[in-house]
Amino acid sequence: MKNNNVYDRIRARVKPETRRYARMNMAIAMRVADILKNKDWTQKDLAKKMGKAESEVSKWLSGSHNLTLKSIAKMEAVLEADVLNVAQREAVRYVTFYVEKSPTGGINEQMPKTATEFSQFNHADGFIAA
Amino acid sequence: MNTFARLIPVEPLSGPKVRYYTIELQHGEAEWSTPESDDFFSRHEDIDRLADMVDEMFVWLDEMAHYTGAKLEFFRNERNALALPPENAKRKYLGRHLNVAYQEYNTLRLYLIRLNGNVVILLNGGEKTSRIPEDCPNVRAHFLRAQQIAMAIDDAMVAGDIQYNRDQTDIIFDQDFEISIP
């Protein structure tokens, strides 16, 4: 019989790689926002420093442009920040920061402590097989 | 004929970081509708070509609820409202470098109202088929309704009909609170 709660149905079928991918996405999103905020930069500032038109950088960031490794490397150089390796590092950071300091208090012993553990962690079910 | 909306919590999606709400609608004297976010996920969950997009969107909401909170950078602007999924750049970047399967373009749109990093009102949406939402038969009505509701919620906040709790992690409103939508 079909579960009559659509949220539970979808939660049950989500593939581990989908969840992992979303977590990394979120980590990247936070990372980019952090870099721009810390530098007090806008997209326009970034474009100027890269010698590109604002519309071009905007296109990169809106996803309508097929970013090359060269473009990413240049962006990293201008931002003076590591972007390529950021996903897992930031993912661990957000888990440790947001979960360990949660209002419910203390470190949850079930939570991942390392990047490897993090990649295997599914909050709904606890640790999952690699 | 006026349409009324009332807020209801979405308990199965809410977590320690985000409380989700959605709305039920009543057109004239008709019965209250299926909650908008339930309708959104129910209508799309079994469409094969959209399944990955639905799952991905669901996971974003789930992760926000449990880990990160509803950070502004996770959403895309949709005039007075917001929507999921976020802009595509970071998604494409990850897909390429981590060799993870991903949707080149997630064409689903779920309109929502982010009151703050802890409280989000999920609305409805659909598969967007044109650049301008008003031109898309699938999302036009949902997009326009999202604009109306966003303004009505804003008015209700200003009037004090909807208030934050003390630590702004939830909202408080009368159980019979309803919003009139022209």
Image: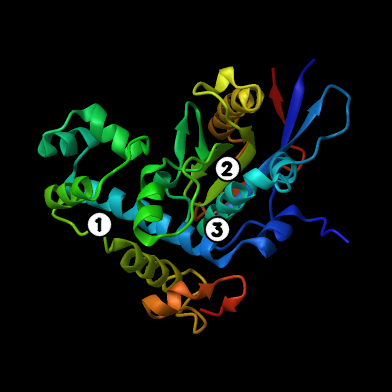
What amino acid is labelled 2 in the image?
Gln
Q: Quadrant of residue B138?
A: top right
Q: Say whether mark 3 and mark 2 are on the same chain.
A: yes
Query: In the rendering, which numbered label is found on residue B162?
Result: none
Residue at the farthest bottom position: A109
Q: Earlier in the sequence, mark 2 or mark 3?
A: 3
The answer to whether B37 appears left or right of A104 in the picture is right
- Residue under numbered circle 1: A83
- Residue under numbered circle 2: B163
Subunit under mark 1: A
User: Which is in the foreground here, disc 3 or disc 1?
Assistant: 1
User: How far apart, in angstroms, are the residues tagged by discs 2 and 1?
Assistant: 40 Å
- Residue under numbered circle 3: B65
Residue at 80% from the left image edge and 29% from the top image edge: B26
The answer to whether A120 appears left or right of A2 in the picture is left
What amino acid is labelled 3 in the image?
Ala
Instruction: Please name the colour scheme applied to the rendered image.
Output: rainbow
Q: Secondary structure at mark 3?
A: helix
Subunit under mark 2: B
